[in-house]
Image (spheres, grey):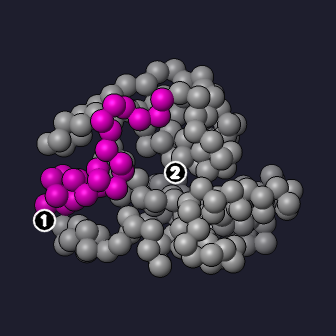
């Protein structure tokens, strides 16, 4: 588990996203924070973080992106669309681009101007389920069985989405889009 120490008075946890699968078959659950103090510079663990970069979040909805390409994953051979966005240091690609597109969709409350998914692309929850069954990294790993038996991919009573609803004092049955709409209003009121 990767961790960055943050001053709780200068940052606000917004949400925990649904898990993503990285190219190296790591199941990653991103946590999104709002950093009010622009001078805040976290101490980075060099073993875990190569570079810290800044990029306008809205660019992940409007582009331009350098290219997109499709790859087949696992036995299903179902395509998965990857994006590459230009940046100062190096292109923002794959997993990082996917996470930032998702954050932008939630933050701005709209889908990107480009086609986000390949025709026939499975939801990430299904891709993770297939990875747990087929990826060599999980074949002898007891943790894969533990992950598969938990509801980390569901919108259940203890899910990250449920915790966000509770923190915002919203009804527990509120649809995900309405939950993030409420979050956007809260952030706008605080700015």
Q: Is residue 119 above or below residue 154?
A: above
Place residue 150 in its image quadrant: bottom left
Marks 2 & 1, CB-CB < 8 Å contact: no
**Can residue 135 be found in the magenta stretch?**
yes
Residue at 31% across / 44% down in the picture? 122
* Residue 72 position within the rendered picture, expressed as x and y whole percent measured from the top left: 24, 34
**Can residue 20 be found in the magenta stretch?**
no
Q: In the structure shown, which secondary structural element does the residue marked by tag 1 occupy? A: loop
Place residue 184 in its image quadrant: bottom right
Looking at the image, can residue 4 be seen? no
The residue identified by callout 2 is 49
Q: Nearer the viewer, mark 2 or mark 1?
A: 1
Q: Is residue 150 above or below residue 125?
A: below
Q: In the structure shown, which secondary structural element does the residue marked by tag 2 occupy? A: loop
Residue at 51% across / 69% down in the picture? 160
- Looking at the rendering, the stretch of residues picked out in magenta corresponds to 115-140
Q: CA distance from mark 2 to mark 1?
A: 28 Å
Viewport quadrant of the C terminus = bottom right
* Residue 50 position within the rendered picture, expressed as x and y whole percent measured from the top left: 52, 45
Alpha-carbon neighbours of circle 1 within 10 Å: few (<14), some, or many (≥20)?
few
The residue identified by callout 1 is 140
């Amino acid at each position: 588990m990767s961790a960055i120490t943050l001053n709780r008075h200068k940052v606000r946890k917004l949400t925990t996203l649904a898990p993503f699968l990285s190219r190296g078959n790591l199941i990653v659950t991103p946590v999104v924070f709002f950093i009010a103090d622009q001078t805040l510079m976290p101490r980075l663990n060099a073993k875990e973080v190569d570079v810290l970069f800044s990029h306008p979040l809205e660019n992940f909805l409007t582009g331009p992106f350098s290219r997109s390409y499709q790859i087949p994953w696992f036995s299903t051979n179902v395509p998965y669309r990857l994006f590459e966005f230009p940046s100062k240091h190096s292109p923002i690609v794959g997993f990082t681009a996917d996470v930032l597109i998702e954050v932008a969709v939630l933050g701005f409350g709209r889908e990107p101007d480009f086609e986000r998914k390949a025709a026939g692309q499975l939801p990430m929850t299904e891709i993770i389920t297939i990875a747990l069954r087929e990826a060599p990294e999980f074949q002898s790993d007891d943790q894969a069985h533990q992950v598969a038996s938990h509801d980390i991919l569901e919108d259940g009573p203890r899910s990250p989405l449920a915790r966000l609803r509770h923190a915002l004092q919203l009804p527990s049955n509120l649809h995900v889009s309405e939950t993030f709409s409420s979050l956007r209003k809260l952030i706008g009121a605080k700015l």
